[in-house]
Amino acid sequence: MSPFFLESFVNRKFRDSMIFKLINFYPPFLGAGVKVKPLNKEGTKLEVSMNLTRFNRNYVGTHFGGSLYSMCDPFYMLILLRMLGKDYIVWDKSASIDFKRPGRGRVHAIFEITEDQFTEIKNKVDELGKFEPELLVEVKDHEGQVICEISKKLWIKKKS
């Protein structure tokens, strides 16, 4: 079931305020133990965390790389969809993950689109018709050490 299942039943303001709370019940996130916490009411800054469990542990007892990536997959796209509104299309185009050290215990990542980043992205899309920004997020352990860096390339276009 998509995290957007309420879209046709509630108004945009309510949906926007609830999306980052409801996503905690998205089955892939439930299974991996991913938790999403909005850090501001605008929904432009979120913390995503995941504890090491038997469901996301690899053969050598550290976080499975696929779980580390999936905990970070949709958030820049969702934040920009919310910020840009219904007149824009936002898709994930590509991603890469660069592992730095084994992940043990609780890991977390902070996703944020600043006002300056948003203005630059929106201006580029409006000027060029489409734009492909690259955004980076660091996944850190409970001591603040970087476990991996994930680069996300988005494809954004203004609707006709």
Image (cartoon, grey):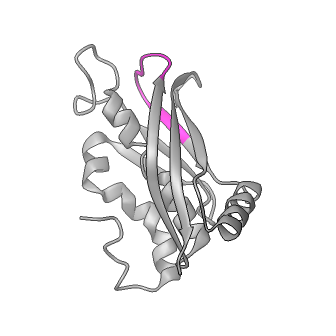
Give the residue drawn at x 69%, y 60%: 118
Magenta includes 89? no
Q: Along the horizontal axis of the image, is 15 left or right of 42?
A: left
Query: Of 62 and 87, which appears nearest the observer?
Result: 87
Q: On the image, which quarter does residue 54 sit in?
A: top left
Q: What x and y, as percent, mark residue 4?
A: 36, 70
Tell me which residue sits at (31%, 58%) in the image. 25
Q: Residue at x 39, y 37 (%)?
A: 69
Q: Can residue 37 be seen?
A: no
Q: Main secondary structure of the magenta part?
A: loop
**Above or below, 115 relative to 148:** below
Specify the quadrant of the image occupied by residue 134: top right
Choose between 1 and 91: the one closer to the eye.
91
Q: Assign the N terminus to one quadrant of the image.
A: bottom left
Q: Is residue 103 magenta?
A: yes
The total of numbered circles placed on residues is 0
Q: Residue at x 47, y 16 (%)?
A: 101
Task: Please determine whether, in this image, residue 114 is positioned above or below residue 105.
Answer: below
Q: Is residue 19 visible?
A: yes
Q: As displayed, is residue 39 above or below residue 7?
A: above
Residue 90 % position (x, y): 49, 63
Q: Seen in the image, is 122 located left or right of residue 137?
A: right
Residue extending furthest front? Answer: 128
Image x and y of residue 133, in percent: 60, 50
Given the current orientation, which residue lies at the most extreme right position?
116
Question: Residue 23, percent across and down?
Answer: 38, 59
Q: Nearer the viewer, residue 156 or 5?
A: 156
Residue with the most extreme top position: 60
In the picture provided, is 120 more to the left or to the right than 81?
A: right
The magenta span reads 99-109
